[in-house]
Amino acid sequence: MAVTISSAVLADILARAAASPEREVCGILLGAGGISSHVPAANVAADPRDSFEIDPTALFAAIRVERAGGPPIAGYYHSHPSGRAEPSARDQAEAAGDGRLWLIVGTGEARLWRAEADGFVAVALAIV
Ligand SMILES: [Zn+2]
């Protein structure tokens, strides 16, 4: 089953990634039943050229908003500035396998994945 994403949200994320050719960008995807908004976050990884770590402050803030009845966290996004829109070996190693969505922006495209317990599964993305 495809997961929907707002075309405005996807355009925002793609623009953010395109504006950062040297560092992976990252953020949080929000929405119930589809991706309706996103929260950009700082990439606090030690080497942001080829890895990402969402600023925990942004993550905790999003969790607080969700617990207060705000939009639920659907997943996360990050970019591979000169790579493919699929999970890297590092992504595979670091994913929690919690069922959350991962939107990965590679060169020229974005693809959606779900972090399952036994690895990433491709998920169809429907732009609305
Ligand atoms: Zn990655």
Image (cartoon, grey):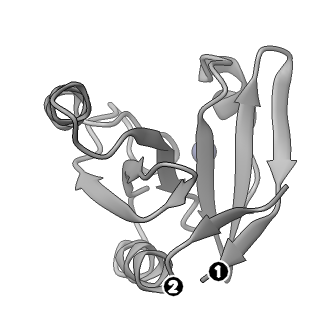
Residue 106 or residue 100, whichever sits in front:
100
Q: How many marks?
A: 2
> For residue 39, what is the image quadrant?
bottom left
Position in image of residue 116 (x %, y %): 77, 24
> For residue 2, what is the image quadrant?
bottom right
Position in image of residue 45 (x %, y %): 34, 34
Q: CA distance from mark 2 to mark 1?
A: 6 Å
Name the residue beneath numbered marker 1.
127
Q: Secondary structure at mark 2?
A: helix
Q: Which numbered circle lies on residue 28?
A: none
Q: Secondary structure at mark 1?
A: strand
Compared with 44, 14 (above or below) is below
Question: Along the polypeptide, which appears first: circle 2 or circle 1?
Answer: 2
Position in image of residue 34 (x %, y %): 56, 58
Position in image of residue 105 (x %, y %): 60, 65
Name the residue beneath numbered marker 2.
7
> For residue 112, what is the image quadrant?
bottom right
66 sits left or right of 48 in the view: left
